[in-house]
Amino acid sequence: MLYKSSRGAEGLMTSAYAIKMGLAEDGGLYIPAQIPKFTQEDIQEMVEMDYHTLTVKILKEFLTDYTYLELVSATDAAYSEKKFGAKPVKMQILSNSTGVYELWHGPTCAFKDMALQLMPQLLTRALEKTGEDKKVVILVATSGDTGKAALEGFKNVEGTEIIVFYPSEGVSPAQQLQMTTTEGNNVKVFGIKGNFDDAQRAVKKLFVDADFAKELADGGFILSSANSINWGRLVPQIVYYFSAYCDAIKNDVIQFGDKVDFAVPTGNFGDILAGYYAKEMGLPIHKLICASNSNDVLTEFINTGVYNKNREFVKTISPSMDILVSSNLERLLYHMLNLDGAKVTEYMNDLQSKGTYNIPGKIMEKIRNVFAGYKVTEQETLDRMQLTHAVKNYLVDPHTAVALEAANRYQNDNPTDKHFCIVLSTANPYKFSKDVLQAVDKDYVSQTVESDMQHLQEKTGMEIPAPLQGLAKKPLLHQDIIEVGEMKEKIKGFLMRNA
Ligand SMILES: *Cc1c(COP(=O)(O)O)cnc(C)c1O
C-alpha cells in the first residue's frame, strides 16, 4: 500500500515515510492510494478477536511496509494492560436504539490515547525503516486533549522531542494541569495567546517553511506532526469502529450484517473520517452523524455545501471541538472528488485566501449519502448531560453529550431509519468536572479542579479515574505563555538547550 498527497503534487510514498513526514511537501495530507476491502467473512472473524489482534489485522492492510512482528510489538506496547486496563474500549448500552462506546480508558482519559499511544510506536519504527539519522521534533497544536495525549505517548521516547502549543485561554483547568505537569526529558509545553486555529495555522506554516527546515536539519532535527493530519494518527482510529460493531453484536443489540449509525463529536474531522474509511473497507455503516458544537462550520458545510470559516470563534464547554478549520475534511474531499488533487488544491487555496469554498451539489449529494450534520448548542449540551444522568444514571462529558444529542435529533428527524446508533464517547467526564457539574448540580459553585472532581464523585458515585487523581498536587513544570509570533524562536531555544 502506497500513499499520495491530497494535493497531488507528490509521487507515491511508503507508509513509514508518510508517518515520518506527517504533512506532504506540497502542503497536502497523505492518503492511501487504494482503500483495502474486507469480506463479510473477514468481519465475522473479528467478532471473536481481542483488541490487539483486531488492531494488527487492520494495520497490516494499510502499513504494508511494516513487518507483522513490528505491528504486533507496536500494538502490544501501545495498548498494554498497565495503560488501558484489561479492555481498552467499552460499550454501554443506553437503550434498544443507542449505545455509547467509551474510548477514554487510556492514560489521559480522552479518546486521543487510542491513536497517540500507538502512533509513537509506529513513528520510531518508521525512523528505522527509512534510515533516518536525525531526531524527530513533534510539533503539536492542541485544543486540549491532543496535547496531553501526545505528551504521554512521546515522553522519553528515544529519538524524539515533543513541543506542544495550547491556547492559554481555551482549555479546561484539568486539561491545562495535565499538560503543564508533564514530566519527561524531551517534552516542552507552551500556552499561546490566541485560539486553537491560531496555533494550528502557525504550526502548519512551520511545516512548510523551507528555511526553518534547513536550519533544523543543520542542527540534526526534522519536524513531524502528531496532529490528526498524520496518517499514523488516523489509522489506529479505524480499528475501534470495527471493534464497536463487534461489541454491538456481542451485546445482542444488532445481528451480524445489520447496518449501524455512528454519531461522532467532531472537531478536526479525524475521528469521523476514520469511520468513513471503515465503511469503505466494508463495515456495515449506514450513516455517520457529524455532531458540532456552536462552532458549526462542518454542520453548515454538510447542509449547504459551503465551507466558511469567516465567523466568530466561540468558546464552548466542549473545547476540543472548538475548531473552524477541520483539517481532515481535505482527505474526504479528495476521495469524494475521485482523487483529483488539483481540484483539492483549488479549494484549499480558496480557503486560505478567502476563508471559504463551495462544493458542487453533485459532490455534496455523495457526501450527504454518508454524513448527516447536527449543531448542538451549549444549553442542549447541558440538558443532554443532565437527562442522561437523571434517566440512565450514566454520566457523559460535554463532547459526548453533543454527539448523544445529535444522535437523538437524527433519530427523531428520521423515524424510518431504524439502525442502532453507536455514539463515540471521547472523554471521561472528570476532565470537564466544572461543566458537568453545571448540568448535574445546578446550585454548585465551582471551586478548584480538585474540589470540583471530589464533588462530582459525591454527587454521582462515578469513580475519579486514576490519571486525574492528585493532579493539583503535581509541580507545574511548564508555565510559559507566549505570542504566536514567538513560536519559532521558542522551538529553537528548546531544541538547542544542550548546545
Ligand atoms: C479531539 C476531540 C474531539 C474531536 O475529534 P476530531 O478527530 O478532532 O474530530 C472530540 N472530543 C474530544 C474529547 C476530543 O478530545
Image: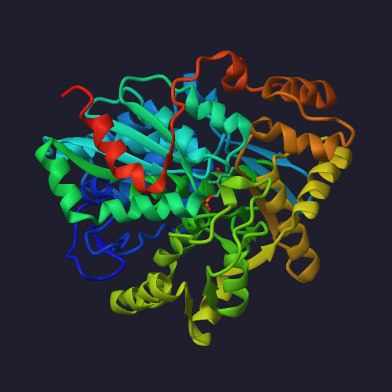
Q: Is residue 259 visible?
A: no
Q: Residue at x 52, y 78 (%)?
A: 366
Q: Residue at x 43, y 49 (%)?
A: 199
Quarter of the image with the C terminus is top left
Q: Nearer the viewer, residue 233 or 74?
A: 233
Answer left or right for 473 relative to 9.
right
Q: Is residue 404 above or below residue 192?
A: below
Q: Is residue 163 above or below residue 398?
A: above
Q: Residue at x 53, y 68 (%)?
A: 309
Query: Residue 90: x and y, percent?
Result: 62, 35
Q: Residue at x 13, y 48 (%)?
A: 214
Query: Residue 181: x and y, percent?
Result: 49, 22
Q: Nearer the viewer, residue 471 or 29?
A: 471
Q: Is residue 132 visible?
A: yes
Residue 264 sits in which quadrant?
Answer: bottom right
Query: Residue 16: x and y, percent?
Result: 22, 46
